[in-house]
Amino acid sequence: MTPIMYRSDFNNSIVREPAILSLLTKDIYLSPLGYDEGGVDHTSGHKVTLSPGSEIDYEGIKLKYEEFIKPDMAAMMSGGDVEMGTKLIVTKDGKDYEISPLIKIKSGQFEYTPAEIEEANLKVEVSKIEQSNHNADLIISKINGDNTTPNQSNEILSVTASIKPFVNLVWAGVVIMVVGFFISMARRLKESRVIS
């Protein structure tokens, strides 16, 4: 399967062409959402992976992954702008803060929106979320303080996959209707000749 995504010279917009694999009982659609070239960035901080409901301690600050913020599936299927992220509960000195770092996909490009808590001198950014189990890769750092290190990021292609069951029955119905139309036309023509 070869889904295609390219920038149109006509209106400078992203064009997405899904790939379709036709099987006996179903069709599989694979449509591209976005592409990130990767490269060297300078994101600072401590990298951790959290699953929904889990928590960690970072320099006396407790972070709990409360829930996954789901993207708008209708916008995702149509290739529109979407955002997803994590809802985190941060506890410092007995005080709770609720933050939501996000990943936004706009015109096929990824934008990462970190969440900051000035009282805790904390910044949290989500770099990746697994769609299967909603595990999130987070980058935790301090707002004040230089802890920047170069990181090599890989190329990322995001796609949506969907299964359409029994599409062949739809096409079989169309073929039966067309054949039935021509049979009825032939019978009517034959009847009209007999009457005349």
Image (cartoon, rainbow, N blue to C red):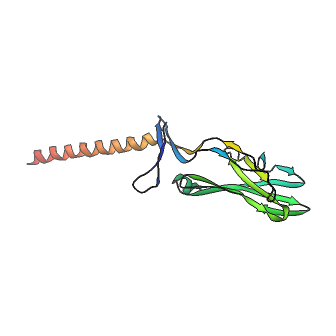
Q: Is residue 192 left or right of residue 61?
A: left
Q: Position of residue 80 (x, y in %)?
A: 53, 56
Residue sticking out furthest to the top: 24
Q: Nearer the viewer, residue 92 or 154?
A: 154
Please give the name of the residue rendered at 56% of the width and 57% of the height, measured from the top-left corner.
81
Q: Nearer the viewer, residue 169 or 100?
A: 100
Q: Is residue 61 visible?
A: yes
Q: Is residue 169 left or right of residue 77?
A: left
Q: Quadrant of residue 99?
A: bottom right
Position of residue 144 relative to residue 137, above or below, is below
Q: Is residue 70 visible?
A: no
Q: Position of residue 60 (x, y in %)?
A: 90, 54
Q: Nearer the viewer, residue 146 or 104?
A: 146
Q: Nearer the viewer, residue 12 or 39?
A: 39
Q: Is residue 41 left or right of residue 139?
A: left
Residue sticking out furthest to the left: 196
Residue sticking out furthest to the front: 146
Please give the name of the residue rendered at 73% of the width and 47% of the height, measured from the top-left corner.
137
Position of residue 18 relative to residue 87, above or below, is above
Q: Position of residue 83 (x, y in %)?
A: 63, 57
Counting every numbered tag in the picture gives 0
Please give the name of the residue rendered at 64% of the width and 41% of the height, measured from the top-left corner.
154
